[in-house]
Image: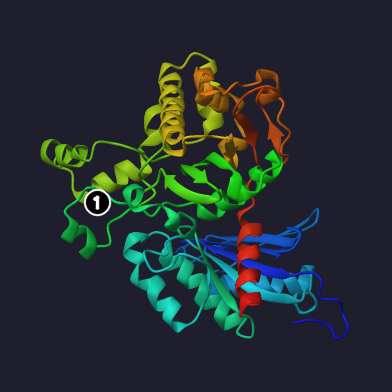
Amino acid sequence: MGTAGEPRTAQHVLVINAGSSSLKYQVVDAASGTALASGLAERVGQTGAVGHLRHEVGEDVHERELPLPDHGAAMAAMREAFEAFGPELASANLMAVGHRVVQGGPEFSASVRIDAEVVAAIEDVSDLAPLHNPPNLAGIRAAQATFGDLPQVAVFDTAFHRSMPAHAATYALDREIAQAHRVRRYGAHGTSHQYVARTAARELGLAPESANLIVFHLGNGASATAVAGGRSVDTSMGLTPLEGLVMGTRTGDIDPAVVFHLARTAGMSIDEIDTVMNRRSGLLGLAGSNDMRDVVDAAEHGDDDARLALDVYCYRLRKYIGAYTAALGRVDAVVFTAGVGENSAPVRAGALRGLENLGIMLDEAANKSVRPGAVSCISVQDSPVTVLVVPTNEEWEIAREAARVVQAI
């Protein structure tokens, strides 16, 4: 999709992240990470709601309200926004469309070009991610209908974690039941962990295959990954994103017998317990808000519930640092990323408090003066373990993966 004679040094990829009621998009140069444009279609397919589209080109922001009955309509609205406000996709030399797919199951250990068999395989593992894979597939089908002349590439959140050894990926569950129902630890946030690990290694002056890292992706969803030599060897999320760290609305690690207890004593159904653990717990359940900024502010103003929520959240982070230090044997850096990880100095300080015996020595002043969007070192100069804040860029990672797959064909 280019103009004759135009240089093709750039590797532009249209990155699509389709949610249940949204379509997030960005045109990214896979070589440099430069974004030509980005946008978000919201309220897709919501009965009685008018859709909203936001399209950004540089500092220019264009917004409009329009009907968005499904992802196909959202894709058409996106294309119209490119035509109306730029940049023209016909002159962008798009080489591929890269799709974020949350769950690849046991089938996919790497990004792949999408064909009918891949679509069927993604659909087959949708029971492992019922809130994510179906809208991801809707985005794929809409893009295939809109950009049928371009290669489509699936980039899986779980793929980075397929390198986990069996002893880290396996639950001590009845083997036949686990195999029959594909129960194992899959992890999530893989594109973010992969991007951040590579960036952190470069910041340390190490080749990715030489760096041992503990990476915290802390957003409304949160996960930790132990990265040895550029490969995930353990991660906090499991079969689903419910396992692991305390999150905005999710419990994280919890005794599974709590499910039986609530069913027996509270008469709650499985669906009701699922809702409580995934949507009404975490920071929201403890402090009344799933926004870490609200929780920190309330804690600093003497709210005991918020103080406890913050303590529980940070204590869980410290526990994972200890566990992953043991798993890795040697840690070169602890790395924070995503919304909370990049922006909350109190959370970073709370996570690292008292870990000097592990060689982790925080520079309090540096921690409080992290510049938004910049890679920052927040440990003291002679800290045996470096502490970094690395802004994540999942769209660039998806674009890189899509370009790699297309170029390998």
Residue 264 appears in which quarter of the rendering?
A: top left
Count of marks overlaid on the render: 1
Relative horizontal placement of residue 241, taking residue 209 as reference (left or right): left
Q: Is residue 161 left or right of residue 408?
A: left
Work out whether residue 137 or residue 400 is closer to the camera in this orientation and state it.
Answer: 400
Q: Is residue 308 above or below residue 291?
A: above
- The residue tagged with tag 1: helix, strand or loop? helix
Which residue lies most toward the top here? 302
Q: Position of residue 9 (x, y in %)?
A: 81, 71
Q: Quadrant of residue 118?
A: bottom left
Give above or below for 112 relative to 1.
above
Give me the residue at 42% from left, 33% from top. Answer: 326
Q: Residues within 10 Å of mark 1 (few under 14, many from 20)?
A: few
Q: Is residue 279 above or below residue 10?
A: above
Residue 61, position in %: x, y?
75, 56
At 51% across and 21% down in the image, what residue appears? 298
Residue 332 seen anywhere in this rendered image of the structure: yes
Looking at numbered disc 1 in the image, what kind of residue is underneath it? Asp
Q: In the current view of this chain or complex, which residue is farthest to the left?
A: 264
Left or right position of 120 against 297: left
The residue where tag 1 is placed is 271
- Is residue 294 toward the left or the right of residue 37 in the image? left
Residue 209, horizontal then vertical, whole percent: 59, 50
Let me know if residue 69 appears in the view: no
Depth order, front residue of 144/74: 144
Residue at point 56%, 30% (across, down): 293
Q: Residue furthest right?
A: 5
> In which quadrant will I find the C terminus?
bottom right
Say which residue appears at 39% left-offset and 59% top-offset.
131
Name the quarter where the N terminus is drawn: bottom right
Against 161, residue 80 (above or below) is below
